Image (cartoon, rainbow, N blue to C red):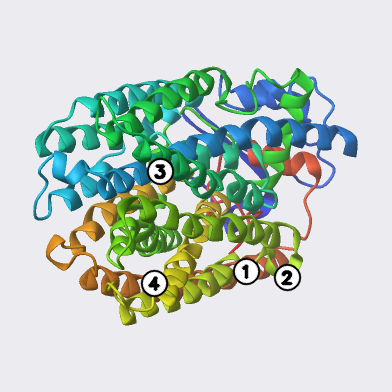
Protein backbone atom coordinates (compact mmCIF):
# COMPACT_ATOMS: atom_id res chain seq x y z
CA UNK A 1 0.00 0.00 0.00
CA UNK A 2 1.54 3.39 -0.88
CA UNK A 3 2.34 5.78 1.93
CA UNK A 4 -0.27 8.39 2.63
CA UNK A 5 -0.07 12.16 2.28
CA UNK A 6 -1.90 14.80 4.31
CA UNK A 7 -4.91 14.68 2.00
CA UNK A 8 -4.90 10.86 1.96
CA UNK A 9 -5.23 10.91 5.74
CA UNK A 10 -8.40 12.97 5.91
CA UNK A 11 -10.31 9.93 7.14
CA UNK A 12 -7.41 8.35 9.04
CA UNK A 13 -6.26 8.88 12.60
CA UNK A 14 -2.95 7.02 12.28
CA UNK A 15 -0.87 4.87 10.01
CA UNK A 16 1.03 1.92 11.43
CA UNK A 17 3.75 0.41 9.23
CA UNK A 18 3.71 -3.38 8.89
CA UNK A 19 6.29 -5.77 7.46
CA UNK A 20 4.58 -5.85 4.09
CA UNK A 21 2.66 -2.59 4.01
CA UNK A 22 0.63 -0.25 6.17
CA UNK A 23 -2.60 -0.68 8.12
CA UNK A 24 -4.92 2.36 8.32
CA UNK A 25 -7.03 2.89 11.41
CA UNK A 26 -10.27 4.49 10.42
CA UNK A 27 -11.70 7.05 12.80
CA UNK A 28 -15.22 7.40 11.54
CA UNK A 29 -18.11 8.54 13.68
CA UNK A 30 -19.22 6.04 16.26
CA UNK A 31 -16.23 3.79 15.65
CA UNK A 32 -14.13 2.96 18.69
CA UNK A 33 -10.42 3.62 18.17
CA UNK A 34 -7.83 1.09 19.33
CA UNK A 35 -6.61 1.78 22.85
CA UNK A 36 -2.97 2.43 23.66
CA UNK A 37 -2.81 -0.94 25.42
CA UNK A 38 -3.45 -2.61 22.05
CA UNK A 39 -0.52 -0.90 20.40
CA UNK A 40 1.56 -4.10 20.42
CA UNK A 41 -0.80 -5.79 17.99
CA UNK A 42 -0.81 -2.75 15.70
CA UNK A 43 2.91 -1.96 15.54
CA UNK A 44 5.84 -3.83 14.04
CA UNK A 45 6.56 -7.24 15.52
CA UNK A 46 9.01 -6.96 18.38
CA UNK A 47 8.68 -3.16 18.52
CA UNK A 48 10.10 -2.05 21.87
CA UNK A 49 8.09 1.17 21.96
CA UNK A 50 4.74 -0.60 21.56
CA UNK A 51 5.73 -3.23 24.15
CA UNK A 52 6.63 -0.48 26.62
CA UNK A 53 3.09 0.91 26.34
CA UNK A 54 1.33 -2.43 26.74
CA UNK A 55 -0.86 -2.54 29.84
CA UNK A 56 0.32 0.86 31.09
CA UNK A 57 -1.93 3.71 32.18
CA UNK A 58 -0.52 6.75 30.39
CA UNK A 59 -2.14 9.42 32.52
CA UNK A 60 0.67 10.95 34.58
CA UNK A 61 0.86 13.44 37.42
CA UNK A 62 3.08 16.48 37.12
CA UNK A 63 5.34 15.04 39.79
CA UNK A 64 5.82 11.85 37.77
CA UNK A 65 6.77 13.84 34.69
CA UNK A 66 9.18 16.00 36.69
CA UNK A 67 10.80 12.89 38.13
CA UNK A 68 11.14 11.48 34.61
CA UNK A 69 12.78 14.64 33.29
CA UNK A 70 15.10 14.89 36.31
CA UNK A 71 16.35 11.36 35.74
CA UNK A 72 17.14 12.11 32.11
CA UNK A 73 18.60 15.55 32.85
CA UNK A 74 20.91 14.43 35.65
CA UNK A 75 22.21 11.27 33.95
CA UNK A 76 22.14 11.78 30.19
CA UNK A 77 22.92 15.49 29.85
CA UNK A 78 26.14 15.40 31.95
CA UNK A 79 27.24 12.19 30.22
CA UNK A 80 26.79 13.68 26.75
CA UNK A 81 28.46 16.91 27.90
CA UNK A 82 31.52 14.90 28.96
CA UNK A 83 31.47 13.12 25.61
CA UNK A 84 31.45 16.25 23.43
CA UNK A 85 33.80 17.97 25.89
CA UNK A 86 36.50 15.38 25.26
CA UNK A 87 35.99 15.86 21.51
CA UNK A 88 36.75 19.58 21.74
CA UNK A 89 39.58 19.05 24.20
CA UNK A 90 41.21 16.74 21.66
CA UNK A 91 40.88 19.41 18.96
CA UNK A 92 42.25 22.00 21.38
CA UNK A 93 45.06 19.62 22.33
CA UNK A 94 46.41 19.57 18.78
CA UNK A 95 46.38 23.37 18.63
CA UNK A 96 47.97 23.56 22.08
CA UNK A 97 50.63 21.03 21.10
CA UNK A 98 51.33 23.14 18.01
CA UNK A 99 51.98 26.22 20.17
CA UNK A 100 54.49 24.15 22.16
CA UNK A 101 56.96 21.98 20.25
CA UNK A 102 54.88 19.52 18.19
CA UNK A 103 55.53 21.23 14.84
CA UNK A 104 59.30 21.34 15.35
CA UNK A 105 59.54 17.86 16.94
CA UNK A 106 57.66 16.27 14.02
CA UNK A 107 59.34 18.53 11.43
CA UNK A 108 56.02 19.77 10.03
CA UNK A 109 56.38 22.10 7.04
CA UNK A 110 54.09 23.80 4.52
CA UNK A 111 50.48 22.66 4.79
CA UNK A 112 51.24 19.51 6.78
CA UNK A 113 49.75 20.90 10.00
CA UNK A 114 46.60 22.06 8.16
CA UNK A 115 46.20 18.58 6.66
CA UNK A 116 46.60 17.02 10.10
CA UNK A 117 43.65 19.19 11.15
CA UNK A 118 41.61 18.38 8.02
CA UNK A 119 42.05 14.59 7.94
CA UNK A 120 40.51 14.41 11.41
CA UNK A 121 37.03 14.91 9.86
CA UNK A 122 37.32 12.56 6.89
CA UNK A 123 34.79 9.79 7.68
CA UNK A 124 31.68 8.95 9.72
CA UNK A 125 30.93 5.18 9.78
CA UNK A 126 28.85 5.08 12.95
CA UNK A 127 25.55 6.66 11.97
CA UNK A 128 24.10 3.49 10.39
CA UNK A 129 25.56 1.34 13.18
CA UNK A 130 23.62 3.39 15.74
CA UNK A 131 20.34 2.52 14.02
CA UNK A 132 21.08 -1.17 13.57
CA UNK A 133 22.61 -1.76 17.02
CA UNK A 134 22.38 -0.45 20.58
CA UNK A 135 23.45 3.20 20.49
CA UNK A 136 25.19 3.19 23.87
CA UNK A 137 27.20 0.05 23.09
CA UNK A 138 28.32 1.42 19.70
CA UNK A 139 29.38 4.75 21.21
CA UNK A 140 31.10 3.10 24.18
CA UNK A 141 33.22 0.84 21.94
CA UNK A 142 34.10 3.82 19.73
CA UNK A 143 35.30 5.81 22.76
CA UNK A 144 37.45 2.91 23.93
CA UNK A 145 39.07 2.76 20.49
CA UNK A 146 39.40 6.55 20.50
CA UNK A 147 41.25 6.53 23.84
CA UNK A 148 43.57 3.79 22.65
CA UNK A 149 44.49 5.71 19.48
CA UNK A 150 44.98 8.87 21.55
CA UNK A 151 47.61 7.06 23.63
CA UNK A 152 49.42 5.92 20.48
CA UNK A 153 49.91 9.60 19.54
CA UNK A 154 52.77 9.56 22.04
CA UNK A 155 54.67 7.24 19.70
CA UNK A 156 54.35 9.51 16.65
CA UNK A 157 57.69 10.75 15.30
CA UNK A 158 56.86 12.34 11.94
CA UNK A 159 54.12 13.75 9.73
CA UNK A 160 53.05 10.36 8.36
CA UNK A 161 52.44 8.98 11.85
CA UNK A 162 50.51 12.09 12.88
CA UNK A 163 48.41 11.89 9.73
CA UNK A 164 47.44 8.24 10.39
CA UNK A 165 46.65 8.89 14.06
CA UNK A 166 44.50 11.94 13.31
CA UNK A 167 42.60 9.99 10.63
CA UNK A 168 41.82 7.17 13.09
CA UNK A 169 40.84 9.65 15.79
CA UNK A 170 38.40 11.21 13.32
CA UNK A 171 36.91 7.79 12.58
CA UNK A 172 36.22 6.95 16.23
CA UNK A 173 35.29 10.46 17.36
CA UNK A 174 32.58 10.59 14.70
CA UNK A 175 30.56 8.39 17.09
CA UNK A 176 30.06 11.52 19.15
CA UNK A 177 27.72 14.22 17.96
CA UNK A 178 25.27 12.27 15.70
CA UNK A 179 24.33 9.68 18.36
CA UNK A 180 23.85 12.43 20.95
CA UNK A 181 21.53 14.33 18.61
CA UNK A 182 19.49 11.15 18.11
CA UNK A 183 19.36 10.34 21.85
CA UNK A 184 18.17 13.88 22.62
CA UNK A 185 15.43 13.65 19.99
CA UNK A 186 14.32 10.25 21.36
CA UNK A 187 14.12 11.25 25.02
CA UNK A 188 12.94 14.88 25.11
CA UNK A 189 9.97 16.51 23.41
CA UNK A 190 10.69 19.15 20.73
CA UNK A 191 9.76 21.92 23.17
CA UNK A 192 12.25 20.61 25.75
CA UNK A 193 15.12 19.94 23.37
CA UNK A 194 16.81 23.34 22.77
CA UNK A 195 18.06 23.81 26.32
CA UNK A 196 19.17 20.15 26.52
CA UNK A 197 21.16 20.49 23.31
CA UNK A 198 22.67 23.66 24.74
CA UNK A 199 23.54 22.07 28.09
CA UNK A 200 25.34 19.05 26.70
CA UNK A 201 27.02 21.22 24.06
CA UNK A 202 28.43 23.26 26.96
CA UNK A 203 31.01 20.51 27.24
CA UNK A 204 32.44 21.97 24.00
CA UNK A 205 33.21 25.23 25.76
CA UNK A 206 33.68 24.37 29.44
CA UNK A 207 36.10 21.46 29.09
CA UNK A 208 38.82 23.32 27.14
CA UNK A 209 39.18 25.94 29.90
CA UNK A 210 40.55 23.75 32.73
CA UNK A 211 42.49 21.65 30.23
CA UNK A 212 44.23 24.72 28.80
CA UNK A 213 45.40 25.47 32.35
CA UNK A 214 46.54 21.85 32.71
CA UNK A 215 48.36 22.03 29.36
CA UNK A 216 50.05 25.23 30.55
CA UNK A 217 51.14 23.50 33.75
CA UNK A 218 52.51 20.55 31.77
CA UNK A 219 54.44 22.95 29.57
CA UNK A 220 56.05 24.70 32.54
CA UNK A 221 57.31 21.55 34.27
CA UNK A 222 60.98 20.95 33.50
CA UNK A 223 62.80 18.74 32.80
CA UNK A 224 60.48 16.28 31.04
CA UNK A 225 61.45 12.73 30.10
CA UNK A 226 59.14 13.32 27.10
CA UNK A 227 58.14 16.47 25.19
CA UNK A 228 55.22 18.23 26.98
CA UNK A 229 52.79 17.65 24.10
CA UNK A 230 53.12 13.86 24.47
CA UNK A 231 51.97 14.05 28.10
CA UNK A 232 48.92 15.99 26.89
CA UNK A 233 47.83 13.08 24.70
CA UNK A 234 48.66 10.56 27.43
CA UNK A 235 46.32 12.34 29.84
CA UNK A 236 43.50 12.66 27.31
CA UNK A 237 43.80 9.04 26.20
CA UNK A 238 43.39 7.72 29.75
CA UNK A 239 40.39 9.97 30.44
CA UNK A 240 38.72 8.94 27.17
CA UNK A 241 39.03 5.25 28.09
CA UNK A 242 37.23 5.92 31.38
CA UNK A 243 34.42 7.81 29.62
CA UNK A 244 34.13 4.97 27.09
CA UNK A 245 33.42 2.44 29.84
CA UNK A 246 30.70 4.70 31.31
CA UNK A 247 29.18 5.27 27.86
CA UNK A 248 29.00 1.53 27.21
CA UNK A 249 26.95 0.83 30.35
CA UNK A 250 24.92 4.05 30.77
CA UNK A 251 24.18 5.68 27.40
CA UNK A 252 20.76 4.40 26.24
CA UNK A 253 19.42 3.20 22.94
CA UNK A 254 15.77 4.19 23.36
CA UNK A 255 13.45 5.27 26.20
CA UNK A 256 11.62 1.96 25.74
CA UNK A 257 14.58 -0.10 27.01
CA UNK A 258 16.76 2.19 29.14
CA UNK A 259 17.90 0.35 32.26
CA UNK A 260 17.56 3.46 34.46
CA UNK A 261 13.79 3.69 33.85
CA UNK A 262 11.12 1.69 35.64
CA UNK A 263 8.54 -0.01 33.36
CA UNK A 264 6.09 2.80 34.02
CA UNK A 265 8.68 5.46 33.27
CA UNK A 266 9.50 3.71 29.99
CA UNK A 267 5.83 3.87 29.00
CA UNK A 268 5.52 7.54 29.94
CA UNK A 269 8.74 8.41 28.10
CA UNK A 270 7.60 6.62 24.94
CA UNK A 271 4.14 8.21 25.08
CA UNK A 272 5.65 11.70 25.44
CA UNK A 273 7.66 11.33 22.24
CA UNK A 274 4.82 9.58 20.40
CA UNK A 275 2.52 12.51 21.17
CA UNK A 276 5.18 14.86 19.76
CA UNK A 277 4.99 13.02 16.38
CA UNK A 278 8.79 12.96 15.93
CA UNK A 279 9.13 9.17 15.87
CA UNK A 280 10.60 6.51 18.16
CA UNK A 281 13.73 4.54 17.27
CA UNK A 282 12.95 1.89 14.70
CA UNK A 283 15.49 -0.78 13.71
CA UNK A 284 13.88 -1.18 10.28
CA UNK A 285 15.59 0.96 7.64
CA UNK A 286 12.88 2.47 5.42
CA UNK A 287 14.16 3.42 1.95
CA UNK A 288 11.36 5.92 1.27
CA UNK A 289 12.42 7.88 4.37
CA UNK A 290 16.03 7.96 3.16
CA UNK A 291 14.85 9.31 -0.19
CA UNK A 292 12.67 11.91 1.50
CA UNK A 293 15.57 13.13 3.64
CA UNK A 294 17.78 13.60 0.58
CA UNK A 295 15.01 15.52 -1.22
CA UNK A 296 14.07 17.72 1.76
CA UNK A 297 15.34 21.28 1.27
CA UNK A 298 15.13 21.92 5.03
CA UNK A 299 17.65 19.14 5.69
CA UNK A 300 20.08 20.62 3.18
CA UNK A 301 19.67 24.12 4.58
CA UNK A 302 20.57 22.78 8.03
CA UNK A 303 23.55 20.97 6.51
CA UNK A 304 24.75 24.12 4.76
CA UNK A 305 24.21 26.12 7.94
CA UNK A 306 26.57 23.79 9.78
CA UNK A 307 29.10 24.04 6.94
CA UNK A 308 29.04 27.83 7.26
CA UNK A 309 29.09 27.77 11.06
CA UNK A 310 32.21 25.61 11.45
CA UNK A 311 34.98 27.94 10.14
CA UNK A 312 34.77 30.33 13.11
CA UNK A 313 35.10 27.61 15.82
CA UNK A 314 37.91 26.18 13.67
CA UNK A 315 39.86 29.39 14.12
CA UNK A 316 39.38 29.23 17.89
CA UNK A 317 40.23 25.56 18.37
CA UNK A 318 43.01 25.06 15.81
CA UNK A 319 44.61 28.40 14.96
CA UNK A 320 43.89 30.93 17.73
CA UNK A 321 46.99 29.92 19.70
CA UNK A 322 49.20 30.55 16.65
CA UNK A 323 47.40 33.84 15.89
CA UNK A 324 47.75 35.07 19.48
CA UNK A 325 51.41 34.06 19.48
CA UNK A 326 51.80 36.34 16.44
CA UNK A 327 51.05 39.38 18.60
CA UNK A 328 54.31 38.75 20.46
CA UNK A 329 53.24 36.34 23.22
CA UNK A 330 55.08 33.16 24.11
CA UNK A 331 53.61 29.74 23.42
CA UNK A 332 52.68 29.25 27.10
CA UNK A 333 51.11 32.71 27.33
CA UNK A 334 49.10 31.95 24.20
CA UNK A 335 47.62 28.87 25.90
CA UNK A 336 46.23 30.97 28.76
CA UNK A 337 45.05 33.79 26.47
CA UNK A 338 42.79 31.32 24.65
CA UNK A 339 40.68 30.83 27.79
CA UNK A 340 38.45 33.94 27.28
CA UNK A 341 37.52 32.62 23.82
CA UNK A 342 36.04 29.53 25.50
CA UNK A 343 34.43 31.52 28.33
CA UNK A 344 32.21 33.55 25.97
CA UNK A 345 30.17 30.58 24.67
CA UNK A 346 29.97 29.24 28.24
CA UNK A 347 27.57 32.12 28.84
CA UNK A 348 26.02 32.47 25.39
CA UNK A 349 25.19 28.78 24.83
CA UNK A 350 22.96 28.16 27.88
CA UNK A 351 21.43 31.62 27.49
CA UNK A 352 20.42 30.88 23.89
CA UNK A 353 19.13 27.45 24.94
CA UNK A 354 17.07 28.93 27.78
CA UNK A 355 15.53 31.63 25.58
CA UNK A 356 14.54 29.21 22.80
CA UNK A 357 13.07 26.71 25.27
CA UNK A 358 11.27 28.76 27.91
CA UNK A 359 10.59 32.19 26.37
CA UNK A 360 7.60 31.98 23.98
CA UNK A 361 8.84 34.86 21.81
CA UNK A 362 12.01 32.91 20.93
CA UNK A 363 10.69 29.32 20.99
CA UNK A 364 9.78 29.30 17.30
CA UNK A 365 12.49 31.72 16.20
CA UNK A 366 15.67 29.72 16.79
CA UNK A 367 16.84 30.30 13.24
CA UNK A 368 16.56 34.07 13.73
CA UNK A 369 18.58 33.81 16.95
CA UNK A 370 21.20 31.94 14.89
CA UNK A 371 21.24 34.87 12.47
CA UNK A 372 21.72 37.37 15.30
CA UNK A 373 24.63 35.42 16.82
CA UNK A 374 26.15 35.13 13.35
CA UNK A 375 26.13 38.91 12.96
CA UNK A 376 28.10 39.27 16.21
CA UNK A 377 30.61 36.65 15.06
CA UNK A 378 30.90 38.29 11.62
CA UNK A 379 31.77 41.65 13.18
CA UNK A 380 34.49 39.93 15.22
CA UNK A 381 35.94 38.30 12.10
CA UNK A 382 36.01 41.65 10.30
CA UNK A 383 37.89 43.19 13.22
CA UNK A 384 40.38 40.29 13.21
CA UNK A 385 41.03 41.00 9.54
CA UNK A 386 41.45 44.73 10.16
CA UNK A 387 43.80 44.18 13.14
CA UNK A 388 46.03 41.28 12.01
CA UNK A 389 48.75 39.81 14.27
CA UNK A 390 51.69 42.21 14.36
CA UNK A 391 54.25 42.28 17.16
CA UNK A 392 54.17 45.53 19.11
CA UNK A 393 50.74 46.83 17.99
CA UNK A 394 47.71 47.34 20.25
CA UNK A 395 46.78 43.83 21.33
CA UNK A 396 43.65 44.54 23.40
CA UNK A 397 41.19 45.07 20.53
CA UNK A 398 42.13 42.00 18.45
CA UNK A 399 42.32 39.76 21.52
CA UNK A 400 38.87 40.94 22.60
CA UNK A 401 37.38 40.17 19.19
CA UNK A 402 39.12 36.79 18.97
CA UNK A 403 37.29 35.95 22.19
CA UNK A 404 33.97 37.35 20.96
CA UNK A 405 34.31 35.46 17.68
CA UNK A 406 33.77 32.25 19.61
CA UNK A 407 30.14 33.20 20.31
CA UNK A 408 29.62 31.28 17.07
CA UNK A 409 30.04 28.10 19.17
CA UNK A 410 26.57 28.78 20.58
CA UNK A 411 25.06 28.27 17.13
CA UNK A 412 26.23 24.66 16.89
CA UNK A 413 23.69 23.15 19.37
CA UNK A 414 20.92 25.27 17.87
CA UNK A 415 21.51 23.76 14.42
CA UNK A 416 21.44 20.32 16.06
CA UNK A 417 18.11 21.34 17.59
CA UNK A 418 16.70 22.33 14.20
CA UNK A 419 17.66 18.93 12.76
CA UNK A 420 16.25 16.95 15.69
CA UNK A 421 13.02 18.92 15.99
CA UNK A 422 12.13 19.17 12.32
CA UNK A 423 12.78 15.63 11.07
CA UNK A 424 10.02 13.08 11.65
CA UNK A 425 10.51 9.34 11.21
CA UNK A 426 13.37 7.31 12.67
CA UNK A 427 15.10 6.52 9.39
CA UNK A 428 14.62 10.02 8.02
CA UNK A 429 16.03 11.63 11.15
CA UNK A 430 18.97 9.23 11.11
CA UNK A 431 19.59 10.10 7.46
CA UNK A 432 19.20 13.83 8.10
CA UNK A 433 21.73 13.68 10.92
CA UNK A 434 24.09 11.73 8.63
CA UNK A 435 23.76 14.33 5.86
CA UNK A 436 24.33 17.22 8.24
CA UNK A 437 27.30 15.55 9.93
CA UNK A 438 28.82 14.63 6.56
CA UNK A 439 28.68 18.27 5.53
CA UNK A 440 30.24 19.14 8.88
CA UNK A 441 33.11 16.83 7.94
CA UNK A 442 33.41 18.43 4.49
CA UNK A 443 33.67 21.87 6.08
CA UNK A 444 36.30 20.74 8.57
CA UNK A 445 38.34 19.13 5.79
CA UNK A 446 38.19 22.05 3.38
CA UNK A 447 38.36 25.16 5.55
CA UNK A 448 41.74 24.46 7.27
CA UNK A 449 43.33 24.40 3.80
CA UNK A 450 42.63 28.14 3.51
CA UNK A 451 44.86 28.68 6.55
CA UNK A 452 48.19 28.55 4.74
CA UNK A 453 51.47 28.19 6.61
CA UNK A 454 52.95 30.90 4.37
CA UNK A 455 50.37 33.36 5.76
CA UNK A 456 50.88 32.45 9.43
CA UNK A 457 50.01 34.01 11.83
CA UNK A 458 47.71 36.40 9.95
CA UNK A 459 45.97 33.74 7.81
CA UNK A 460 44.21 36.39 5.72
CA UNK A 461 42.73 33.89 3.25
CA UNK A 462 41.32 31.80 6.08
CA UNK A 463 39.73 34.82 7.73
CA UNK A 464 38.16 35.88 4.40
CA UNK A 465 36.70 32.38 3.93
CA UNK A 466 35.31 32.52 7.48
CA UNK A 467 33.68 35.92 6.88
CA UNK A 468 32.09 34.68 3.65
CA UNK A 469 30.74 31.56 5.36
CA UNK A 470 29.33 33.63 8.22
CA UNK A 471 27.49 35.89 5.79
CA UNK A 472 25.98 32.87 4.05
CA UNK A 473 24.89 31.47 7.44
CA UNK A 474 22.88 34.63 8.13
CA UNK A 475 21.06 34.27 4.79
CA UNK A 476 20.40 30.53 5.30
CA UNK A 477 18.98 31.03 8.80
CA UNK A 478 16.47 33.59 7.54
CA UNK A 479 15.49 31.32 4.63
CA UNK A 480 14.91 28.37 6.99
CA UNK A 481 12.63 30.50 9.18
CA UNK A 482 10.36 31.51 6.30
CA UNK A 483 10.25 28.07 4.65
CA UNK A 484 9.10 26.39 7.88
CA UNK A 485 6.48 29.01 8.67
CA UNK A 486 5.05 28.92 5.15
CA UNK A 487 4.71 25.12 5.37
CA UNK A 488 3.07 25.30 8.81
CA UNK A 489 0.46 27.75 7.52
CA UNK A 490 -0.22 25.50 4.53
CA UNK A 491 -0.76 22.51 6.83
CA UNK A 492 -3.04 24.46 9.16
CA UNK A 493 -5.16 25.50 6.19
CA UNK A 494 -5.30 21.91 4.86
CA UNK A 495 -6.40 20.57 8.25
CA UNK A 496 -9.03 23.28 8.53
CA UNK A 497 -10.38 22.44 5.08
CA UNK A 498 -10.62 18.78 6.10
CA UNK A 499 -12.55 19.80 9.19
CA UNK A 500 -9.90 18.37 11.53
CA UNK A 501 -8.94 20.78 14.30
CA UNK A 502 -7.89 18.55 17.21
CA UNK A 503 -6.80 14.97 17.81
CA UNK A 504 -7.47 12.80 20.84
CA UNK A 505 -4.56 11.72 23.00
CA UNK A 506 -4.78 8.08 21.87
CA UNK A 507 -4.91 9.15 18.25
CA UNK A 508 -1.75 11.21 18.65
CA UNK A 509 0.12 8.39 20.40
CA UNK A 510 -0.87 5.86 17.74
CA UNK A 511 0.11 8.28 14.99
CA UNK A 512 3.43 8.86 16.75
CA UNK A 513 4.10 5.12 16.95
CA UNK A 514 3.54 4.84 13.19
CA UNK A 515 7.07 6.17 12.56
CA UNK A 516 5.90 8.43 9.75
CA UNK A 517 7.99 11.28 8.38
CA UNK A 518 7.23 14.93 9.00
CA UNK A 519 6.02 15.30 5.40
CA UNK A 520 3.50 12.44 5.65
CA UNK A 521 2.24 13.18 9.17
CA UNK A 522 -0.44 15.92 9.06
CA UNK A 523 -0.09 16.50 12.82
CA UNK A 524 3.58 17.46 12.52
CA UNK A 525 4.49 21.15 12.82
CA UNK A 526 7.92 22.62 12.18
CA UNK A 527 9.74 24.63 14.83
CA UNK A 528 12.14 27.04 13.12
405 or 57, which lies in front? 405
Inspect this view and state whether residue 1 appears: no
Label 4 or label 3, whichever lies nearer to me, is: 3
Classify mark 1: residues with Cα within 10 Å, few (<14), some (14-19) or many (20+): some
> Label 4 to label 2, Cα distance in Å?
25 Å
Ranked by sequence position, the earlier of labels 4 and 3 is 3
Q: Position of residue 318 (x, y in %)?
A: 31, 53
Point out the frontmost of discs 1 and 4. Answer: 4
**At which x and y percent is residue 415?**
50, 57
Q: Is residue 438 left or right of residue 513?
A: left
Report whether 305 appears left or right of 192.
left
Foreground label between 2 and 3: 3
Q: Secondary structure at mark 3?
A: helix
- Look at 16% across and 38% down and name the residue there: 163
- Mark 4 vs 2, N-terminal side: 2
Task: Locate residue 119, reporting x and y percent.
Answer: 21, 44
Q: Earlier in the sequence, mark 1 or mark 4?
A: 1
Where residue 365 is drawn, which disc sits there?
1
Please rate how many residues cluster around mark 2, counting C-alpha atoms within 10 Å: few if below 14, some from 14 to 19, many from 20. Answer: few
Crowd rating for badge 3 (residues with CA inside 10 Å; few <14, some 14–19, many 20+): many
**Which label lies toward us, 4 or 2?**
4
- Residue at image mark 2: 361
SS at circle 2: helix
Residue at left offset 34%, top offset 74%: 467
Verify CB contact (< 8 Å) between mark 2 and mark 1: yes
Res 46 → quadrant = top right
CA separation in Å, label 2 and label 3? 43 Å
Say the numbered circle drawn on residue 470: 4
Residue marked by disc 3: 216
Amino acid sequence: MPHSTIMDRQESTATIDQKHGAQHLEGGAGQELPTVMEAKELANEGDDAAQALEGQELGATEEELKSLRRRMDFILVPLMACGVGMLLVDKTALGSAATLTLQTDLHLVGTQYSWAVSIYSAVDPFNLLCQRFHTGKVVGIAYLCWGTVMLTTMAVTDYRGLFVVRFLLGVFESANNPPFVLVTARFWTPEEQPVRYALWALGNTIFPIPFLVIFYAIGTVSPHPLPPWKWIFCLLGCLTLVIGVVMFFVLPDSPSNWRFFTPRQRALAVARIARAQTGIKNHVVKPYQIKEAFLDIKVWICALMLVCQQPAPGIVSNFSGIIIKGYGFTGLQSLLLQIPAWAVPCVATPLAGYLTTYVPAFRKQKSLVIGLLSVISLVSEVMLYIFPPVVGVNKVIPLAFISLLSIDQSIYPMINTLVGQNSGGATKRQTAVAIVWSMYCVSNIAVPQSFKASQSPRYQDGVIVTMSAQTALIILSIAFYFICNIENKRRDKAMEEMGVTTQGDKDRILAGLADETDKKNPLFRYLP
